[in-house]
Image (tube, helix red, strand yellow):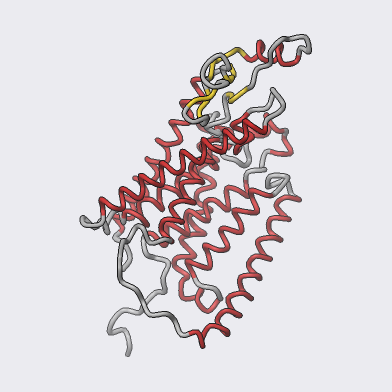
Amino acid sequence: MPMKLSNVMLLLVVVTICAVFSLRIFQGIDEMMGDQYWVVDTTQGDHGWYAMGLLPCVAKVPKDVVKAANSNPAAPAKYLIYAQNGDFAGNTVYGISLGIPLIMYLIWFACILGFPDRVDPYLLPRRIFTTTVIIICSIIVNLFLMRVAADFARDPMSRIANVAGTQASLLFHSAGIWFAILFSALGTTNHSARESRAPDSRNWQTQANEKFNWMFLLLLGATLLEVCLVQSRLALPDAALDYALWLMAVVIFMRMFGFSPKYWIKRARGIAIALTGTFCTLPIFYLLERATGTLGAGFASPILAATHGPENANIGLSLMLSIYLIFWMEFAAAIRRNGPVRPLAGSRG
């Protein structure tokens, strides 16, 4: 049964508010640094790290002081830079940075908690516990990755946060998505003892062949699309992150709408929501960047043009398309409009 329009709007508003608030926390960390580096304070703790070696003791030092000391061969000590302004919030690609938490909170609220119209009073405490575990796992994994990156950082000018995952906000929210999917796959959100009968294996062969044929065809299409985007300077040059998200989008598309055109035709409503939502999102972030001057859209961006050169003003377009395609596909499923359209009762003549 599709979700009521009022619940659809409530879900979208709540998810958006949570994503903005979450990203605002990371922006606050950036603002705390200002025009200074956070450097590892080796005079405290175990070589400057505490909390089982996951968190550093940091001190704020002006950038010119750090650069002068690290570039001077005669300097007795070098600074190990932990982070600088821009390592956490990702304001230059704000449209991309916001898209990841949007997906994360949508999965948490709609798929795990059942918000807003399927909140089960009996299962809610268990599902809140599951969400809490996901948050804790995400934080620990991020701190662990940053610590590993710190161990491998040999250049004293390298920034640990960037080595660990470009922007810490993207890394945290991506881990939140991963753990949410993992816990859902393990069935920890349902806590149901009911088991269904195993499917008849005699029907597997033909269906599996059809699935694989269409899956590889879609993957080929995504690959060619990514190559074209990279060649046109509309994606990151190394293509690794962009391509991974397009592969994820293909898998989610097949899971949401079926594995061949005979299913896609019946689910045209959900596909229309995904495509329309994606292409309506782009101008919103374009206008937001023009209005604020600080929150980058990720494409057609004066901020990217100033920092990376005018030829790279659109390098975030591929990520924007893939991230918001994933979000709106998940949204169509969350509001239960990704299934086939059923004829109304009594419509037969």
The residue shown at (48%, 29%) is 27
Decide: is 115 above or below 236: below
226 relative position to 90: left or right? right
Position of the C terminus, as image quadrant, is bottom left
Q: Position of residue 210 (x, y in %)?
A: 59, 79
346 relative position to 235: left or right? left
Residue found farthest to the bottom: 349
Q: Name the one closer to the observer, 81 or 17.
A: 81
- Residue 67 appears in the figure: yes
Q: Name the one closer to the observer, 145 or 228.
A: 145
Q: Position of residue 314 (x, y in %)?
A: 66, 42
Position of the N terminus, as image quadrant, is bottom left
Q: Position of residue 330 (x, y in %)?
A: 45, 58
Q: Name the one closer to the observer, 94 or 42.
A: 42
Decide: is 245 above or below 236: below
| Residue 343 occupies quadrant | bottom left
The residue shown at (50%, 72%) is 258
Q: Name the one closer to the observer, 284 or 95.
A: 95
| Residue 307 occupies quadrant | top right
| Residue 68 occupies quadrant | top right
349 relative position to 120: left or right? right
The residue shown at (50%, 28%) is 55
The residue shown at (60%, 38%) is 165
Residue found farthest to the left: 121
- Residue 35 appears in the figure: no
Q: Position of residue 248 (x, y in %)?
A: 57, 58
Decide: is 177 above or below 205: above
Disc tally is 0
Residue found farthest to the right: 73
